[in-house]
Amino acid sequence: MDQGLIYTIIQSVLLLLIGGVVGLIVKKLNEKFTPEEIAKYKEVFMVFVMAVEQIGKVLGWDGKQKFEEAKKRAIAWLASKGKILSEEQIQSLIEACVAELNLNLGGLGKAP
């Protein structure tokens, strides 16, 4: 089989899976927050995720290190705003941002 075809098939499957994960995460968040709250938190968390992707790229961080840094930044921001989210809610928002970033970048997890 042609390598290009295999790559295309793998990429298509990854995009499908990531799309499904994003859908499940958004559904879960919709049960706990208003759409406006989700949009606000997700927008801010996306900034953290993108920044951490760039920092992690330079410092050679793995996924766990990047996640922990994004979580630390999110918790600090939430505290500065007097907002409290559970660990699970923070993790879900970060995962949704990572999945969306991956989806927008071809599903390969490459930071811009």
Image (tube, rainbow, N blue to C red):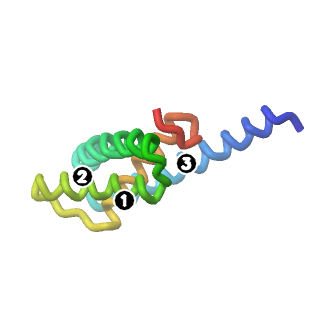
User: Label 2: which residue?
Assistant: 34
Q: Which label is found at residue 68?
A: 1
Separation of residues labelled 3 and 1 (CA atoms): 21 Å
Q: Nearer the viewer, residue 68 or 45?
A: 68
- Report helix, strand or loop for mark 1: helix
Q: Residue at x 42, y 43 (%)?
A: 53
- Report helix, strand or loop for mark 3: helix
Of discs 3 and 2, which sits in the foreground? 3
Residue 5 in which image quadrant = top right
Q: Are marks 1 and 2 in contact (CB under 8 Å)?
A: no
- The residue at the far front in this view is 59
Using the image, determine if residue 17 lies above or below residue 9.
below
Q: Nearer the viewer, residue 59 or 34?
A: 59
- Report helix, strand or loop for mark 2: loop
Amino acid type at mark 2: Thr
Q: Residue at x 55, y 48 (%)?
A: 18
Percent x, y of residue 81: 11, 53
User: Label 3: which residue?
Assistant: 18
Badge 3: how crowded within 10 Å, few (<14), some, or many (20+)?
some
Residue 52 in which image quadrant = top left
Separation of residues labelled 3 and 2 (CA atoms): 23 Å
Amino acid type at mark 1: Glu
Badge 1: how crowded within 10 Å, few (<14), some, or many (20+)?
few
Percent x, y of residue 15: 60, 42
Of discs 3 and 1, which sits in the foreground? 1
Residue 49 in which image quadrant = top left
Q: Please report whichever mark, 3 or 1, sits nearer to the chain's N-terminal start.
A: 3
Q: Residue at x 28, y 61 (%)?
A: 32
Separation of residues labelled 1 and 2 (CA atoms): 26 Å
Q: How many marks?
A: 3
Percent x, y of residue 92: 38, 58
Amino acid type at mark 3: Ile
